Image (cartoon, rainbow, N blue to C red):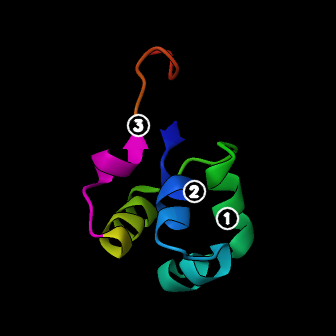
Amino acid sequence: MKNKIQELRKERKVTQSELADAVDVTRQTIISLENGKYNASLILAHKIAQYFQLQIEEIFIFDLEEENI
């Protein structure tokens, strides 16, 4: 699943550590999300969306073909 976390974070001048602290995960989790190595749980996706004051769908891009659905 693709996401816009890195783009949003850089636009708002937020470090990976600051975002990680705000959503109660490790910096490594943010790195993995940004690199597409990890898909966020629904709860984490919701926390990230709340942090950026956006809808989940505005941050996380679900591709049916990519997910083999």
Residue 64's x, y, as percent? 40, 19
The kind of secondary structure element at disc 2 is helix
Of residue 69 and residue 13, the one placed in the foreground of this image is 13
Residue 34's x, y, as percent? 63, 52
| Distance between mark 2 and mark 1 Cα atoms | 12 Å
Q: Is residue 66 magenta?
A: no
| Residue 32 against residue 9 in the figure, above or below | above
The kind of secondary structure element at disc 1 is helix
Q: Earlier in the sequence, mark 1 or mark 3?
A: 1
Q: Which residue is mark 1?
A: 29
Q: Residue at x 55, y 76 (%)?
A: 14
Q: Earlier in the sequence, mark 2 or mark 1?
A: 2
Q: Which residues are magenta?
A: 53-61
> Callout 3 environment at 10 Å: few (<14), some (14 to 19), or many (20+)?
few
Q: Is residue 56 magenta?
A: yes
Of residue 55 and residue 43, the one placed in the foreground of this image is 55
Q: Which residue is mark 2?
A: 6
Q: Which residue is mark 3?
A: 61
